[in-house]
Image (cartoon, rainbow, N blue to C red):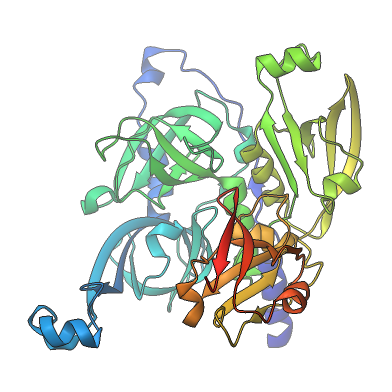
């Protein structure tokens, strides 16, 4: 019986997190309704929002010359106890949301990532120590498991795709460490990116301040619609422009954590694009500007395999509109890997459909990492560029050649830097680390042709 019960529990934890269907929104129709209180919503949601306190020990370098025997001989008094660095303790605070009664808390990666100690405090003043069991820096989400917790209050998740601009919301968190605080507002925008074009967020005018990070953005039924993550501010305080990671991506993170994963597996797209503006729409013969114009396509891209070409306009993924590269990344991230997704695209005015395979970036050709052991380039670590390396290193889709992973030893004096792409050695093109080995000349002086920051140049070796 115990074995059967345990099996049932494990199976239940493996199920995807259910997303509740949104209730039909309604505008208050009388003065009495306008005066209604948010208190019932707060009573329902607040117990599942926690305060998080973290401690991190960091190494602080005292001087770029500390630890150097020559400089310490003459300037030893400036380097107490001869140490090149010293430890410093950093304390920070934030918020989190309980999503499993057994003690799983979702927060921001920038709140708990890299913390040495995590203390979680509930609204009833109970305290638990926690550890990060899942971290995804790209989405700024992390999952913390609480030690010894059970039967905790939880928040249900709502389908964030149902949100509309104007929906009433509450933000719950621990701003400035003053204690749990509730602010109200509306959904100011959906499908928002930051000024750097990163992410896919719900925008709200509910006041969000430092310390609110990782807290809950809830609807009028007390369901989680997003995890508060950042603000847009020149002063550091709330200006009524806050952003939250949508609940649909939070649900994907919870599923991954329950499945025992420690990071979010994202599909590799191998495609580059730009939003269709009014000017582009006119050039494409499209009446209404929408979609993403594909302007880059890696040969191994699943979009290329599905028949798409540069110049096509991607309109939707699994029936959901995509109007920016950030929105495309969000849609595919919530779907995960190991399946296909239906896409809709436009080609020369004709609407077409196809399916793409959602899978991690392929390691083909093999990266075949090497470390140069001798000579002027001794200590240089290199890998062959493939789609997986492009994804990990953030390289352009067109990148080919050899990536410099690290520079140590004698190679530090050559001018080669980490992140350089070597495309030729002594005027001979190289595509793999095997090519590099074969073409590396024995003579003392030769040139490396590298690409750095999108620009090509020569590095003179041994001259």
Residue at the (57%, 84%) spot, across then down: 375
Question: Is 276 situated above or below 114?
Answer: above
Number of numbered callouts drawn? 0
Given residues 396 and 357, the one toward you in this image is 396
Question: Is 204 situated above or below 135?
Answer: above
Q: In this view, does 100 lie to the left or right of 349?
A: left
Q: Is residue 220 shown to the viewer in this render?
A: no
Among all residues in the image, which is located at the extreme left?
77
Residue at the (81%, 13%) spot, across then down: 285
Measuring from the top left, give residue 85's x and y in whole percent.
Answer: 24, 79
Given residues 147 and 345, the one toward you in this image is 345
Measuring from the top left, give residue 421's x and y in whole percent.
Answer: 63, 61
Measuring from the top left, give residue 299's x and y in whole percent.
Answer: 84, 50
Q: Is residue 23 left or right of residue 387?
A: left
Given residues 395 and 359, the one toward you in this image is 395
Q: Is residue 35 shown to the viewer in this render?
A: yes
Given residues 82 and 183, the one toward you in this image is 82
Q: In which quarter of the image is the N terminus?
A: bottom right
């Amino acid at each position: 019986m115990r074995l059967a019960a345990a099996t049932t529990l494990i199976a239940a934890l493996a199920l995807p997190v259910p997303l509740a269907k949104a209730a039909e929104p309604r505008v208050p129709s009388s003065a009495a309704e306008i005066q209604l209180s948010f208190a019932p919503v707060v009573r329902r949601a607040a117990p599942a929002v926690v305060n998080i306190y973290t401690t991190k020990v960091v190494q602080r370098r005292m001087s770029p010359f500390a630890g150097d025997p020559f400089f310490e001989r003459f300037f030893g008094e400036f380097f107490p106890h001869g140490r090149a660095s010293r430890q410093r303790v950093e304390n920070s605070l934030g918020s989190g949301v309980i999503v499993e009664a057994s003690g799983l808390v979702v927060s921001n990666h920038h709140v708990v990532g890299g913390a040495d100690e995590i203390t979680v405090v509930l609204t009833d003043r109970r305290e638990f120590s926690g550890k990060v069991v899942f971290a995804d820096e790209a989405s700024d989400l992390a999952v913390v498991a609480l030690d010894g917790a059970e039967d905790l209050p939880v928040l249900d998740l709502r389908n964030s795709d149902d949100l509309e601009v104007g929906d009433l919301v509450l933000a719950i968190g621990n701003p400035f460490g003053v204690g749990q605080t509730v602010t109200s507002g509306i959904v100011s925008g959906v499908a928002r990116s930051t000024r750097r074009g990163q992410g896919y967020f719900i925008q709200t005018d509910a006041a969000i301040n430092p310390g609110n990070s990782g807290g809950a953005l809830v609807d009028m039924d007390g369901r989680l619609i997003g995890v508060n993550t950042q603000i847009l501010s020149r002063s550091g305080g709330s200006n009524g422009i806050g952003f939250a990671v949508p609940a649909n991506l939070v649900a994907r993170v919870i599923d991954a954590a329950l499945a025992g994963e420690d990071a979010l597996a994202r599909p590799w797209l191998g495609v580059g694009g730009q939003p269709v503006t009014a000017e582009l729409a006119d050039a494409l013969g499209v009446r209404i500007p929408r979609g993403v114009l594909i302007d880059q396509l890696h040969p191994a891209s699943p979009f290329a395999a599905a028949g798409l070409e540069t110049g096509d306009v991607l309109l939707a993924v699994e029936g959901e509109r995509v109007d920016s590269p950030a929105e495309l990344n969000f849609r595919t991230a919530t779907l995960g890997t190991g399946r296909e997704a239906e896409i809709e695209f436009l080609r020369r005015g004709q609407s077409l459909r196809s399916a793409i395979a959602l899978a991690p970036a392929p390691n083909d050709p093999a990266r075949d990492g090497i470390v140069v052991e001798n000579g002027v380039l001794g200590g240089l670590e290199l890998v062959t560029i493939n789609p997986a390396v492009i994804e990990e290193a953030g390289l352009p889709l067109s990148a080919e050649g050899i990536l410099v992973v690290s520079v140590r030893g004698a190679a530090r004096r050559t001018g080669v830097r980490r992140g350089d792409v070597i495309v030729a050695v002594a005027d001979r093109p190289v595509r793999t680390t095997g090519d590099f080995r074969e073409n590396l000349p024995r003579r003392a002086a030769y040139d490396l042709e590298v690409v750095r920051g999108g620009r090509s140049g020569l590095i003179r070796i041994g001259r």
